[in-house]
């Protein structure tokens, strides 16, 4: 049976990307060698690395003030790398706490300076995105947000992002689970980071996009592997990059370009809308978060009667729907419907929900 992949990350990839990746394991770029065994300095791979970095800038519509890096250590390593590079011990950064990942980021930042939590939805189990922010502790060196909260299924809307941008000189975003999911003015952000394994490739590569002018102001000496400037100077080849993961990301970026960000955005909106409609129409299931903050990428829901949840899991399994269980800290269900999820996948989930309801 064909499986439909709703995993939250690592996650679904376009079929064409999987096929190209397989072919490169046999023979990469006509080298007569597998991509798994070539030097990262081999010209065809240097072209992939440079091509992927340029493609990210192109897709985001960013100019030469920005640099793009492929790093390792996941989005989680950016939790310390960002403040290490930006925040002198005596300075203050503003963080908005909208979920487990956002909280992880602000906890690490406290090692490097003062952190003000300028808004939080923690007390309501992260069920919404706060729309007002406490700016009284200004000046903030930067403000950090998580644009999409993968575990809870909330996402910043564009108008709120713009409003926040108007109140800070430097905006930093963990975009791990909604990068390239929508058309957006990426120049709103001074630093964007994302683990590639959700919407931009496979595990092992982390994308960092940074406006160069925000770097170089901290007084401590940065370890080389932590210093964004070192990675910029070395074109993301300071040490051995994750060759295969960067290649897979490059393939995904090319696929995104073919589809067009605008089309993907419309596609993602339509998928999410259909699924939320089915949840709202259902007598069994309900959404977990404020409607206006619902994520287009991670659709989280529970059953009114929680005892029914294992039964729906069983049914979903028989339909080949994989990875719909909610994060272990939340329970319920989470359907991750990233760019590569076809509308037919969402239809299959909706059909399973309706069948489940009809059977009861
Ligand atoms: C998955 C995720 C992370 C963690 O990413 P790693 O690459 O595993 O470190 C951080 N932030 C968000 C928003 C995520 O979705």
Image (cartoon, rainbow, N blue to C red):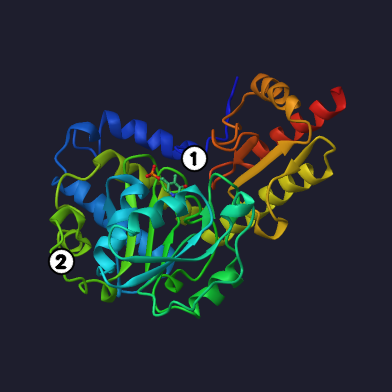
Kindly identify which residue carries mark 1. 14
Q: CA distance from mark 2 to mark 1?
A: 43 Å
**Image quadrant where one finds the N terminus:** top right
Q: Disc 2 marks which residue?
A: 220
Q: How many numbered tags mark residues here?
A: 2
Q: Is residue 49 in view from this perspective? A: yes
The residue positioned 78% from the left and 42% from the top of the image is 278
In this rendering, would 72 be left or right of 165?
left
Residue pictured at 54% horizontal, 70% vertical: 161
| Label whose residue precedes the other's in the sequence (2 or 1) | 1
Residue 324, given in percent of the width and then of the height, sits at: 61, 32
Q: Quadrant of residue 10?
A: top left
Q: Nearer the viewer, residue 103 or 243?
A: 103
Q: Secondary structure at mark 1?
A: loop
Q: Residue at x 35, y 71 (%)?
A: 92
The quadrant where residue 351 appears: top right
SS of the residue at dot 2?
A: loop
Residue 105 to residue 219: above or below: above
């Amino acid at each position: 049976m064909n499986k439909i992949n709703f995993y939250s990350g690592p996650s679904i990839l376009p079929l064409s990307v999987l096929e190209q990746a397989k072919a490169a394991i046999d023979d990469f770029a006509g080298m007569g060698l597998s991509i798994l065994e070539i030097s990262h300095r081999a010209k065809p791979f240097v072209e992939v690395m440079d091509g992927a970095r340029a493609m990210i800038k192109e897709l985001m519509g960013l100019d030469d003030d920005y640099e793009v890096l492929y790093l390792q250590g996941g989005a989680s390593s950016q939790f310390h790398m960002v403040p290490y590079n930006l925040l002198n011990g005596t300075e203050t950064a503003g963080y908005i706490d909208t979920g487990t990942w956002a909280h992880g980021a602000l906890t690490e930042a406290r090692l490097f300076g003062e952190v003000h939590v300028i808004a939080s939805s923690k007390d309501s189990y992260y069920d919404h995105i706060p729309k007002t922010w406490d700016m009284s502790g200004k000046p903030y060196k930067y403000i950090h947000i998580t644009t999409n909260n993968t575990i809870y299924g909330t996402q910043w809307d564009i108008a709120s992002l713009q409003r926040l941008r108007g109140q800070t000189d430097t905006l930093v975003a963990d975009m791990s689970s909604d990068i390239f999911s929508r058309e957006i003015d990426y120049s709103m952000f001074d630093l964007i980071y994302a683990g590639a394994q959700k919407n931009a490739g496979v595990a092992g590569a982390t994308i960092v996009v940074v406006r160069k002018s925000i770097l170089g102001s901290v007084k401590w000496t940065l370890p080389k592997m932590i210093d964004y400037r070192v990675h910029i100077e070395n074109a993301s080849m300071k040490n051995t990059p994750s060759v295969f993961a960067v290649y897979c990301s490059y393939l995904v970026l090319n696929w995104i370009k073919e589809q067009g960000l605008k089309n993907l955005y419309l596609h993602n909106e339509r998928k999410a809308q259909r699924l939320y409609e089915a949840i709202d129409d259902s007598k069994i299931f309900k959404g977990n978060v404020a409607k206006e903050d619902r994520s287009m990428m991670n659709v989280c829901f529970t059953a009114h009667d929680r005892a029914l949840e294992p039964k729906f899991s069983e049914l979903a399994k028989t339909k080949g729907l994989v990875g719909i269980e909610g994060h272990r800290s939340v329970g319920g269900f989470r359907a991750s419907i990233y760019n590569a999820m076809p509308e037919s996948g969402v239809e299959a989930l909706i059909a399973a929900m309706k069948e489940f309801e009809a059977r009861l």
